[in-house]
Each structure stands twice: as structure tokens, then as C-alpha cells.
């Protein structure tokens, strides 16, 4: 990591510059030096710097003023302050204005080296998160919204809550993109430079889930050969995303509630609490009101996680998004596989738009991936998709009005949970007419 990090050492004392430069070059860093604030800003403009090691007391522009100008010119650069004991108060002011840390002269080079390694790790993490945020920001508009209808409403609500530290519950059927929504919230939040830690609660048994969340000390249980930091601890100053929160057992709910209240966590088998300052985002495909009524979810825990709710509608309720998503997935997988695919044929697009997509966006993504795998060039044909779309003679996609009506009725019924009264009202027909059409198209209630 050191070889990729650029240091700029700023000190008016030549021997300090030269000795520190030699020390950090031996450790593999790229090092430049400057004798004062003006020279440092000139070098920063020409060559950039990931981390600046700045002496607080210099003639002309002091370290505090230099830091202010660095934050304006290169806000992602990290500043570490060097100070004499008498100027510690000024160094503390630098911390309040955004410096990463300070070290008091005279210091052991090993101490400064450890401090710079930590700063370099932080800088690298910030860069990784920035790259992730840019990828999410680029893909999210295509993946979760077509700019109208329910998804536009979702995105507007997301923009409202993202900059806050409010706990968010994301609901929706499996495959609708709840994790993507969580990642977009994190990417647009004040914690975006911290880690986004994801835990799938449904995939872990209760005992394993506790160890995964809280970490453990060596010897706390059979097989605990060493200390392990838990996901909550790793999410400190970042975001913790608990997927399938409806599957968390009541005992774990109690423990999580205490963590949220105290903002600290104790590892399994340990006694000392560890700071846990994180933003919580949860997601579920379950009906949490039903879970509360059945006693499987505590009321106090529910109200703590559901301060703000975002609902991701199923794909069948937003058919206008299907062409947008399909084209995005074709482009993505064709690029990944190095294939020349000329989009989707009209028949294939009609088939995609007619299908009800019970598996939502994930099913569409998988279907397009498979189609690109088997594609031998040209536009993807309807036959490349494995689901059963309405077909006419010769196996071609049925583009008739009857096929469109059948597809629409199936989507409305699925949306209403096959509630005949709701579905007939939504369709603008009476119950008897709906029953007759269901019989005509051989639609059976599940």
C-alpha cells in the first residue's frame, strides 16, 4: 500500500525534511518535500499529495493556515500535524478543522511511521469508497428508477433521508434491489468515507449471527482461536446494513437494541465495551406488522429500526422500467463477456415486457445474463429467454391484444395478492367479468 501513497513533508528545518524523507522512502512511499506553505501549495497543485506531514510552526504561512488552504484546494488529502509541546493547543485546533492527527516533537520515527500507516489505510479506504460510490451513482438511476412513477418517488425520499443519520428500513419483495437502495443511501450520506458493512441475517444461525455481529475474544467458545472484530465494530463511523432483519431472533433483537442505545458493543467472551458509532439500515421482504402481531418481532426494536421506511415496488408494478433495465443488463454482460450483442429484438423486448417477473429485477438480470451467454451475435431473440412468454404459431412471441390483456390481468392479480375485489376495481371491471377472463386465460389463484 505504501508504494501507492504520495507523501508531502512540509517543514522549514532542512534536517527534519531530509531525515523524514529518507525514512519514508525506505518504507516505500513516494515522497516530496517543501520548506514552507507556499512551496507546499505549489507542489500540491503540480503533483498532488495523498498525505501531508506539516509542521505547525513555520515562518510566513503556518501549518494551520496551510491546512485550511489544502482543504480548499485538495479536500481529499489527509493532513498530519507535527508540533512542539508548547503548540499542542494549536494542533488541537487543527484537529477540529479536519486534520487527521498530530504528533509532538521530539518523536520516535517509529511512532510517526505507525501514524502514517494508519492515515494511509484510511486514505486508501476513502478512495475505495469513492470509487464504489461513483459506480453506484452511475448505475443506480438505471437500476432502481426510470425517472417516473413509484421509483421516482422512492428516489426523492431517498435523497431526503440519505444525508441524515436516521435509521432506515427498506421493504420490498425478494429481488427488487433493496441492497442497492442501502448502498445508494450510504454513498449519498455523510458517512460515505466510512465502511458499508453488509450482514445477511437470514443466512446465519443465532449463535453464528451473534459472533458475526459482535465479534469474539480468544477462547470464548470452542474453535475461537483468536480475537475477531465483529461486523458492528467494523462499521464504526460507517453504515451497518442488516439484510432480512425480519429473520433476527428476539434475543438478538434485545442485544441489538442495547447496542443502538449505548453506541457500544461487547465482544462475545469479553468485558470491555468497544465504540460502535454507525448508521443502521435494515431490509426485509417480510410483513413486519404480522411479525410483531405474532410476537416474533419486539415492538421497541421495530420502532427503533423503522424511523424512516422506504418501499421498493416489485417490477410488475413498474413495467415502464423493464426496457431500461434490460438494455442496461445487456450492455453490462456483453462488456463483461467480451461479446458483440446488438441489443434486444422487438420480439424479445415484447416478451420481457409481457412477463410478470415474480423474481423481480434479480430474475430479469439472471435471464439477460443467460441470454447473453448463449448469444452467437446480433440482437437477442425471444427464444434466448427461458421463461414462458405468450407465443403464437411457430413459437413467435404473441403480440396480439389478447396476449397483452392476459399479461396485464396477471400482473394486476399478482399485485393485489389475487384479491378479486381489489383486482377488479383496479382493472375497472366487475368481479364476474374478471372471473370469466381468468377462466378464458386459464389463470388460477395460487
Image (cartoon, rainbow, N blue to C red):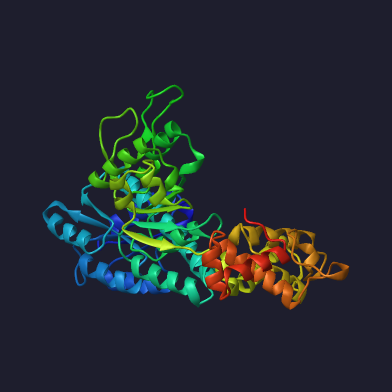
Q: Nearer the viewer, residue 349 or 115?
A: 349
Where residue 414 appears, as percent x and y from the top left, is 58, 61
Q: Quadrant of residue 382?
A: bottom right
> From this viewpoint, which residue is outermost toward the right?
394
In the drawing, does residue 403 fall left or right of residue 428? right
Quadrant in which residue 321 is drawn: bottom right
State left or right for residue 369 relative to residue 197. right
Q: How many marks?
A: 0
Residue 320 or 62: which is nearer the viewer?
320
Could you tell me if residue 147 is visible in this image? yes
Residue at x 28% of width, y 57% of height: 100
Residue toward you, 38 or 378: 378
Point out residue 403 in the picture as x, y percentages from the top left corner. Answer: 73, 72
* 72 relative to 212, above or below: below
- In this rendering, is residue 165 above or below 428? above
Residue 25: x %, y % from top left: 43, 52
Please give the name of the residue rendered at 34% of the width and 41% of the height, measured from the top-left corner. 253
* Residue farthest toward the front in the current orientation of the protein: 432
Query: Relative to residue 410, is residue 21 depicted above or below?
Result: above
Q: Is residue 143 visible?
A: no
- Taking the spot 38% from the left edge, 23% from the top edge, the residue there is 219
Tell me where residue 434 appears, x and y as whole percent.
62, 68
Which quarter of the picture shows residue 316? bottom right
Query: Of 36 and 271, which appears nearest the observer?
Result: 271
At 21% across and 48% down in the image, what residue appears?
A: 106
Amino acid at each position: 500500500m505504501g508504494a501507492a501513497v504520495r507523501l508531502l513533508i512540509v517543514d522549514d528545518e532542512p534536517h527534519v525534511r531530509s531525515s523524514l524523507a529518507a525514512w519514508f522512502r525506505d518504507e516505500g512511499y513516494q515522497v516530496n518535500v517543501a520548506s514552507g506553505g507556499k512551496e507546499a501549495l505549489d507542489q500540491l497543485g503540480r503533483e498532488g499529495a495523498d498525505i501531508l506531514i506539516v509542521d505547525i510552526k513555520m515562518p510566513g504561512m503556518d501549518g494551520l493556515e496551510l491546512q485550511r488552504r489544502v482543504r480548499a484546494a485538495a479536500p481529499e488529502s489527509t493532513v498530519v500535524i507535527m508540533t512542539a509541546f508548547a503548540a499542542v493547543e494549536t494542533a488541537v485546533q487543527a484537529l477540529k478543522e479536519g486534520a487527521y492527527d498530530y504528533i509532538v516533537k521530539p518523536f520516535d520515527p517509529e511512532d510517526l511511521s505507525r501514524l502514517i500507516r494508519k492515515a494511509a489505510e484510511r486514505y486508501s479506504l476513502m478512495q475505495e469508497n469513492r470509487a464504489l460510490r461513483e459506480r453506484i451513482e452511475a448505475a443506480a438511476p438505471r437500476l432502481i428508477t426510470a425517472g417516473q412513477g413509484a421509483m421516482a418517488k422512492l428516489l426523492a425520499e431517498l435523497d431526503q433521508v440519505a444525508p441524515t443519520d436516521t435509521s432506515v428500513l427498506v421493504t420490498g419483495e425478494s429481488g427488487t434491489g433493496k441492497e442497492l437502495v442501502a448502498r445508494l443511501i450510504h454513498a449519498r450520506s455523510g458517512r460515505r468515507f466510512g465502511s458499508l458493512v453488509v450482514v445477511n441475517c437470514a443466512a446465519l444461525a443465532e449463535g453464528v449471527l451473534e459472533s458475526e455481529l459482535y465479534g469474539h475474544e480468544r477462547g470464548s467458545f470452542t474453535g475461537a482461536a483468536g480475537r475477531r472484530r465483529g461486523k458492528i465494530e467494523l462499521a464504526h463511523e460507517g453504515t451497518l446494513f442488516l439484510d432480512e432483519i425480519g429473520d433476527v431472533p428476539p434475543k438478538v433483537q434485545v442485544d441489538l437494541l442495547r447496542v443502538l442505545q449505548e453506541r457500544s458493543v461487547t465482544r462475545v467472551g469479553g468485558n470491555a465495551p468497544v465504540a460502535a458509532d454507525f448508521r443502521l439500515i435494515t431490509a426485509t421482504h417480510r410483513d413486519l406488522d404480522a411479525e410483531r402481531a405474532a410476537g416474533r418481532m419486539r415492538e421497541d426494536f421495530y420502532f427503533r429500526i423503522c424511523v424512516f421506511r422506504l418501499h421498493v415496488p416489485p417490477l410488475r408494478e413498474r413495467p415502464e422500467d423493464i426496457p431500461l433495465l434490460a438494455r442496461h443488463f445487456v450492455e453490462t454482460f456483453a462488456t463483461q463477456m467480451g461479446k458483440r450483442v446488438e441489443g434486444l429484438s422487438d420480439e424479445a423486448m415484447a416478451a420481457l415486457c409481457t412477463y410478470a417477473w415474480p423474481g423481480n429485477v434479480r430474475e430479469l438480470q439472471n435471464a439477460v445474463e443467460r441470454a447473453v451467454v448463449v448469444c452467437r451475435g446480433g440482437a437477442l431473440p425471444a427464444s434466448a429467454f427461458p421463461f414462458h412468454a405468450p407465443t403464437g404459431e411457430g413459437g413467435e412471441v404473441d403480440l396480439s391484444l389478447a396476449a397483452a390483456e392476459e399479461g396485464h390481468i396477471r400482473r394486476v392479480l399478482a399485485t393485489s395478492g389475487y384479491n378479486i375485489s381489489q383486482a377488479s376495481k383496479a382493472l375497472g371491471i366487475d368481479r364476474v367479468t374478471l372471473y370469466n377472463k381468468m377462466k378464458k386465460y386459464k389463470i388460477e389463484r395460487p
